[in-house]
Amino acid sequence: MRELTVENIHLAYDKNPVLKGVSMSLEKGEVVSLLGASGSGKTTLLRAVAGLEQPSKGRIFIGDQVLYDSDKNLELPAEQRNLGLVFQSYALWPHMRVAENVAYPLTLRKESKAVIQEKVHAILDQLGLKGLGDRYPSQLSGGQQQRVAIARALVYNPPVILLDEPLSNLDAKLREEARVFLRELIVSLGLSALMVTHDQSEAMAISDRILLLNGGSIEQQGTPQEIYSHPRSLYAAEFMGSNNRLNGKVMQVNGSAVQLQGEGWTIWGQSEQALQVGQAATAIVRVEQVRLQTEHMGDSITLPLLTSMYLGDKWEHVFRTNDELSNSLRAFGQTPLQHGNYHLHLPPENTWIYAV
């Protein structure tokens, strides 16, 4: 069952287009992340759904209820959309106690004191905040404040919860823990959630589906595995993961298999594009896919070691190339390396080639 539908949304700031005909859907019980670089339109799309930004064209539905329809000149105010919203800053009232903050949406809906008390106690207990109702936000840790903001968004049981960078204010260690908590909470409650994030690891860990935005349009959408393992464009390939980039010229095309040649190397890769022999192209391969070999073989590049860096669970080795645009190639290993030349294998099935 579809909870949220967005159709052909356009939105501009001072005639500068920010959203260029974005369409998407959110199924019941699904978590969808809006991922992209700064300025890609992800936060603007979330705010348009929430009613905090006014599009110029398109339609937005929650179930069968119309929230916005440009053709019918209909726009439901934010307070009537019945959506749960968790802000990046949490936006807790500093002069209100935790229980009062969480109760605020119910107070606006004129619920009885008995109902408010029952629902507030239930959601605080569910989110691990039992016994903290009388504290002020300043007396809580960052993780606890985040949970209060989530409790306030969930207390009136909205059909969709909107999350705007919900983990960005937490430190790295706490962010990992909160990621697990948030995913478990969403699944256990059967929530439908639309989340904005710039953190690809966060999006992949929490989401059922990712919408990768680029310049106000959806570049690619799919499961985290599809987005990471089968990028359909150079932008999608470079945005996700830690990557190596090699620039060269197409030498052979055999179906989806493409041979690319650069200065001192020749490799094979995969491409869904209609590339032509002699055409300039770029190869992208994830750093974790590159393998060190004892001798030069097919699809190997021999390069001198520039430096090695210890990352705790592994070493990152950096090799020098002759490419002026991307003058290094990286690989992971379990031990440090001595300076010298090394053979790096780039597996053709995990090397993607795109036109430039």
Image (cartoon, grey):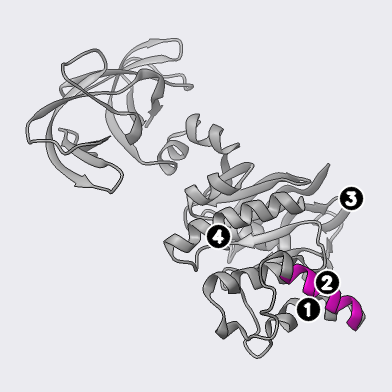
Label annotation for residue 178: 4
Instruction: Examine the residues drawn in magenta and state their main secondary structure.
Output: helix
Residues at badges 4 and 2 in contact (C-beta under 8 Å)? no
Residue annotated with mark 2:
119
Q: First in sequence: mark 4 or mark 3?
A: 3
Amino acid type for the residue under numbered disc 4: Ala
Marks 4/3 in contact by CB < 8 Å: the verdict is no
Q: Is residue 335 left or right of residue 223?
A: left
Quadrant position of the N terminus in the picture: top right
Rounded to the nearest angstrom, the CA distance separating label 4 from label 2 is 23 Å
Above or below, 22 relative to 137: above
Q: Amino acid at mark 1?
A: Ala
Looking at the image, residue 78 lies above or below residue 275:
below
Helix, strand or loop status at disc 3: loop
Position of 37 compared to 216: left or right? left
Label 2: which secondary element: helix
Q: Is residue 177 visible?
A: yes
**Dividing the picture into quarters, in which one does residue 329 lie?**
top left
Q: Which residue is mark 1?
A: 103
Cβ–Cβ under 8 Å for marks 2 and 1: yes
What are the residue bounds of the magenta stretch? 113-124
Question: Is tag 4's residue or tag 1's residue first in the polypeptide sequence?
Answer: 1
Residue, x 20% and y 46% (percent of image)? 309
Neighbour tally class for label 1: few under 14, some 14-19, many 20 plus, Cα within 10 Å: many
For this view, does 106 lie left or right of residue 128?
A: right
Q: Is residue 114 magenta?
A: yes
Which dot marks residue 64? 3
Front position among marks 2 and 3: 2
Between 252 and 301, the one lying in front of the other is 301
- Amino acid marked by disc 3: Asp
Q: CA distance from mark 4 to mark 1?
A: 23 Å
